[in-house]
Image (tube, rainbow, N blue to C red):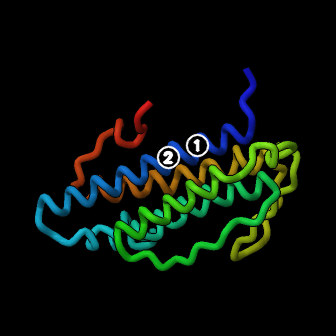
Amino acid sequence: MTLSIAQLVKTTVRRNLTVLDTLLDKAAAFAAGRNFDAGVLLGSRLAPDMFPLTRQVQIACDMGKFMAARLAGQKAPVFEDVETTLPELKERIAKTLAYVDSVDDAAFDGAEQREVRVPTRAEELVFQGRDYLVGFAVPNFYFHVTAVYLILRHNGVELGKRDFIGGR
């Protein structure tokens, strides 16, 4: 069996953003059950030099949409970083999933060898598609999804490994 880049990208993004959406539901339920504003969780971070939960969700979504767009040779939609509530973050997740799902599988043909350019503050990184996917995009995507999980868990939201792994 061969696993295509389209299948890998779409499955990875869908599964993990769905998990992220569920984590935000659990955060809302946790805050409601303890009678405090869930917005407190949005500003939480694991360390002073790390981004807060809101930014972690935004970046996870960005990593998902850029993974699909760059490997499909497309321009990613622009999502302004304006979310300030859990429902707004959940909407960002939904928009990201809708975009990734909309990318035609055929657009990923040749993605393994496609040149991918990633602008950073310091420099522009240049990859072949396979190296971008395996060595940059997927690890960064998981990093930010994991950061959300850890921030919530650190703040007392009752989460376990199954919450991070997700359903079948």
Residue 15 position within the rendered picture, expressed as x and y whole percent measured from the top left: 51, 42
Structural crowding at the residue carrying mark 1, measured as other residues with C-alpha within 10 Å and reported as few (<14), some (14–19) or many (≥20): some
In this picture, is 109 found above or below 141?
above
Cβ–Cβ below 8 Å for labels 2 and 1? yes
According to the picture, the residue beneath numbered tag 1 turns out to be: 12
Under mark 1, the amino acid is Thr
Q: Secondary structure at mark 1?
A: helix
Residue 117 position within the rendered picture, expressed as x and y whole percent measured from the top left: 81, 63
| Residue at the image point whose x is 70% and y is 44% from the top | 134
In this picture, is 27 found above or below 166?
below
* Mark 2 and mark 1: Cα distance apart in space: 6 Å
According to the picture, the residue beneath numbered tag 2 turns out to be: 16
Q: Secondary structure at mark 2?
A: helix
Q: Quadrant of residue 63?
A: bottom right
Structural crowding at the residue carrying mark 2, measured as other residues with C-alpha within 10 Å and reported as few (<14), some (14–19) or many (≥20): many
Under mark 2, the amino acid is Asn
| Residue at the image point whose x is 45% and y is 65% from the top | 91
Residue 96 position within the rendered picture, expressed as x and y whole percent measured from the top left: 57, 59
Relative to residue 89, is residue 104 drawn left or right?
right
Relative to residue 165, is residue 130 drawn left or right?
right
Residue 13 position within the rendered picture, expressed as x and y whole percent measured from the top left: 57, 48
| Residue at the image point whose x is 42% and y is 66% from the top | 89
State how many labels appear: 2
Name the quarter where the N terminus is drawn. top right
Relative to residue 58, is residue 63 drawn left or right?
right
| Residue at the image point whose x is 27% and y is 58% from the top | 27
Name the quarter where the C terminus is drawn. top left
Nearest the eye: 132 or 105:
105
Nearest the eye: 134 or 90:
90
Q: Quadrant of residue 119?
A: bottom right
